[in-house]
């Protein structure tokens, strides 16, 4: 059996899920791939936290150079979050000839050109399925099975926190502030929810999708973005009277040579498949000139769903490397 | 630009759609892949039919050996339908060192072992995304992005004809016979609708999914299969009273080491995402031990949606071959 060594940068929620998934499904993954995946290094300061996993103490490091200079490391999985430092480490890894997988939408959206160009320059693979839509196979479906399509438009629900809030406001007829507090208590929203509720997180994901679907680079800050903070119970009621629900949508459309995109709360008729995407679920709806309407639906966040997408990328890289 | 030559076996509806898609999106496909795809041969008796396409007369052949013995042919796309002859040609093509793509669920379901083993023996690729769910990226998503998951269960609406009939019976409160006649008039059902309405077509697709999802070979005729011919307006009404709809589902479930599967009409609560999959649309709902719930939705039939999946496979083969 061939062997692929990975290094995980950051053992937060997603990093821990990524580690757990391999422990949980190792036998299945070996059978499916005939590859022995090993976590060679974990870059993490807090080694003493109880994460419910067993880590060989030799695997911890706090020195990125130990990873970059180790010729045995095939794939670096960046799960640190943030933009500057994580981008630097991804570029360092690529320059050291390592393939890179990330779930970091902010870093990919901010630094798409330099990351993709550095990967190409070094002849390494760079994959980021988990950065948009968590576990849903979006980016890889668009770039492989669906690649023959010219796309007309797409729109999606790409943030679990805001979708959870809007669903609760609709189903339980509660005001925004009350639902936000509940979401924070239950861990569905962060203490500072700005990036979610103001649509910034969705704009990062839309920026990535614009590159993938339309081959057009749009920086997140260039995307007209409205969050959900001004949605009232009255708005939700009015929508219901018109047989609609309010959803925070990332939308993009091609008309002639012009491609427009935006993030904003939108009235969706209850007949539309996206109107039934509730709670923390995400979905992307696309219209292609061959496949017509297609929708991909699943959990847009959470350690194991996100780890599913990360391992999909790591495994594809492993297959590609061991086939050479 | 590298070049990939394909041969299309059979220029019926799907074959014509496959040819049209390349004409329609050639520039887009070249930009996305840096590969020049050419249709070198078309195996077809009826060359004079008006299909709304222009074919260089040199491309027609009625002799499969002309294709198999042509060293320039990289990929054979089998779109003849039927089982025996199409399987023979796929095996001949593989033995001649050619990669094979097919949309033929009956042939794949009947001859899964010999087809996959012959491909492996010859070191060629064999892909059949279009055989289940038309344009929906199912098989490739399960075998790549989602491959790290152990699957708990899946169920899907995988036949457009029966879903069209059940949708009409539900929405327009019409009896089965009336709706079937309308479906036949509108081209949604064949003159002999047996394979669709008795669930045989779905059983073929479920057989393929059992191999892909659970790695378990179940022949279509071994699957307990009930069609929709006995569904009455009364059944539909009774379902509605319980806030349910009736859908013809392909289902499979793993309990312990036991994996069971069946095709039958099922009561689905209107809250379930599959309950909103109407008319000719298809969808597959899966539960994995990492990704949790995921659903893939789109057009399960039709020339261009099916051609989208066929080209996804051809392009992936083209990329793989030109990368060697």
Image (cartoon, coloured by chain):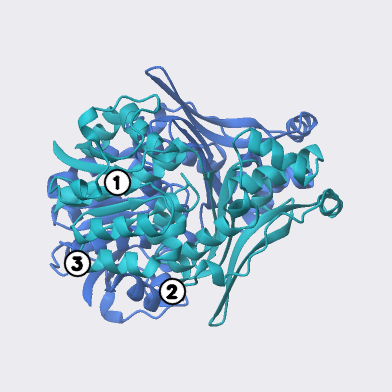
Chain colours: A cyan, B blue
Structural crowding at the residue carrying mark 3, measured as other residues with C-alpha within 10 Å and reported as few (<14), some (14–19) or many (≥20): many
Q: Position of B299 compared to B105: left or right?
A: right
- Pinpoint residue B220: horizontal percent, then vertical percent: 40, 33
Q: Is residue A72 above or below residue B73?
A: above
User: Of circles 2 and 3, which is in front?
Assistant: 3
Mark on residue A314? 1
**Whole-Å distance between the Cαs marked 3 and 1?**
33 Å
Residue at the spot of label 3 = B73
Quadrant of the rendering where the N terminus of chain A is positioned:
top left
Residue in the picture at 26% in, 79% down: B58
Residue in the picture at 55% in, 45% down: B193
Q: Position of A284 compared to A268: left or right?
A: left
User: Of circles 3 and 1, which is in front?
Assistant: 1
**Whole-Å distance between the Cαs marked 2 and 3?**
25 Å
- Pinpoint residue B180: horizontal percent, then vertical percent: 66, 47
- Pinpoint residue A281: horizontal percent, then vertical percent: 58, 43
Q: Going from the N terminus, do you reach mark 2 or mark 3 first?
A: 2
Q: Is residue B229 above or below residue A73?
A: above
Q: Position of A24 compared to B3: left or right?
A: right
Image mark 1: chain: A
Element marked by disc 3:
loop
Along the viewing direction, whichever of B226 and B265 lies nearer the viewer: B265
Residue at the spot of label 2 = B49
Along the viewing direction, whichever of B51 and A291 lies nearer the viewer: A291
């Amino acid at each position: 059996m061939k062997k692929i060594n990975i290094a995980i940068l950051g053992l937060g929620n997603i990093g821990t899920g990524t580690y757990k998934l391999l422990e949980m499904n190792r036998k299945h993954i070996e059978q499916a791939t005939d590859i022995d995946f090993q976590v060679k290094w974990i870059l993490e300061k807090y080694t003493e936290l109880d994460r419910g996993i067993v880590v060989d103490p030799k695997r911890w490091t706090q020195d990125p150079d130990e990873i970059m200079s180790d010729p045995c490391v095939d794939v670096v999985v960046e799960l640190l979050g943030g933009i500057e430092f994580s981008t630097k480490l991804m570029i360092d890894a690529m320059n050291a000839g390592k393939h890179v997988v990330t779930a970091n939408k902010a870093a990919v959206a901010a630094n798409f050109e330099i990351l993709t160009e550095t990967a190409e320059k070094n002849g390494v693979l760079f994959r980021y399925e988990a950065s948009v839509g968590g576990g849903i196979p979006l980016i890889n479906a668009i770039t492989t099975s669906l690649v023959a399509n010219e796309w007309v438009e797409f729109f999606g629900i790409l943030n679990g926190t805001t979708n959870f809030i809007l669903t609760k406001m609709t189903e339980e007829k509660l005001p925004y502030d009350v639902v936000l507090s509940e979401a924070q208590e239950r861990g569905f929203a962060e203490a500072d929810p700005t990036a979610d509720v103001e649509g910034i997180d969705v704009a990062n994901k839309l920026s990535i999708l614009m590159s993938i679907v339309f081959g057009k680079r749009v920086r997140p800050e260039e995307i007209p973005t409205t969050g959900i903070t001004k949605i009232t119970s009255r708005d939700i009621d009015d929508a219901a009277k018109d047989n609609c629900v309010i959803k925070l949508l990332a939308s993009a459309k091609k008309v002639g040579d012009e491609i427009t995109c935006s993030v904003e709360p939108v009235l969706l008729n209850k007949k539309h498949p996206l109107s039934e995407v509730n709670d923390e679920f995400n979905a992307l709806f696309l219209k292609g000139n061959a496949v017509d309407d297609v929708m991909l639906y699943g959990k847009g966040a959470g350690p194991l769903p996100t780890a599913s997408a990360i391992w999909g990328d790591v495994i594809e890289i492993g297959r590609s490397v061991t086939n050479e």
